[in-house]
Amino acid sequence: MTGSWADPVCGRPGWEPDEHLVHTALAGRVDARALPGPDRAHVVTELTRRGLTANEVADRLSCSLRFVRNVQADPVTAVYVYAAAQRDAAAALDADHRRTVARLTRERDEQRAAAERYRAQRDDLIDRRARARHRV
């Protein structure tokens, strides 16, 4: 496996996607038959999600269309597709959250500036009224 790690809960080896593998596959320098199952699922799914047809994926991975179809039908691929969709949904929520925070921060700053202007106007009115009383 190209991306490996130890699971923090049980300590057994796990798997993590390697984005460099996808870029290498896009360049046509990957032999899919030499990859372990999770890496095959990762590469085939990512290439498909980027708009490549099964024939184009087979060309990039130096394998047959049948091999690509078998990888696409593999349960590991279904799990990876689900995980990728969840990752994309989380990224979209995060981007939306960041936009909301930026908008609210801008609005807060505008409100603080308005409050400061109102305080200055109030103080100016109080000072003018006090000066007018002293003249009388």
Image: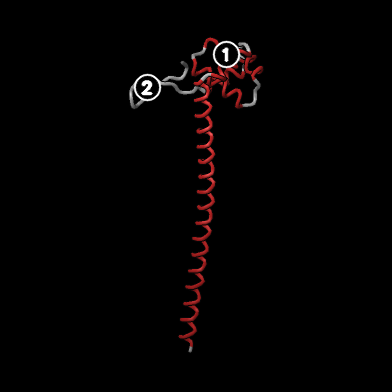
Residue where numbered disc 1 is placed: 30
Task: Choose top left, top right, bottom left or bottom right for residue 29.
Answer: top right
What residue is at 61 percent from the left and 11 percent from the top? 63
Q: Farthest residue to the bottom: give it.
A: 136
Residue where numbered disc 2 is placed: 6
Residue 120 coordinates in the image, percent (x, y): 49, 69
Q: Specify how the rendered protein is coloured.
A: secondary structure
Residue 108 coordinates in the image, percent (x, y): 50, 56
Above or below for 81 versus 113 = above
What residue is at 53 percent from the left and 32 percent from the top? 85
Distance from disc 2 to disc 1, alpha carbons, whole Å, reads 25 Å
Q: Amino acid at mark 1?
A: Val
Query: Neighbour class for label 1 at 10 Å: few (<14), some, many (≥20)?
Result: some
Q: Is residue 61 left or right of residue 75?
A: right
- Looking at marks 2 and 1 on the same chain, the residue that comes earlier in the sequence is marked by 2
Residue situated in front as seen by the camera: 55 or 94? 55
What residue is at 37 percent from the left and 22 percent from the top? 6
Query: Neighbour class for label 2 at 10 Å: few (<14), some, many (≥20)?
Result: few
Q: Helix or strand or loop: what does disc 1 sit on? A: loop
What residue is at 54 percent from the left and 44 percent from the top? 96
Q: Helix or strand or loop: what does disc 2 sit on? A: loop
Residue situated in front as seen by the camera: 35 or 77? 77
Residue 49 coordinates in the image, percent (x, y): 60, 27
Q: Amino acid at mark 2?
A: Ala
Above or below for 71 versus 133 = above
Residue 110 coordinates in the image, percent (x, y): 53, 58
Residue 1 is tagged as none
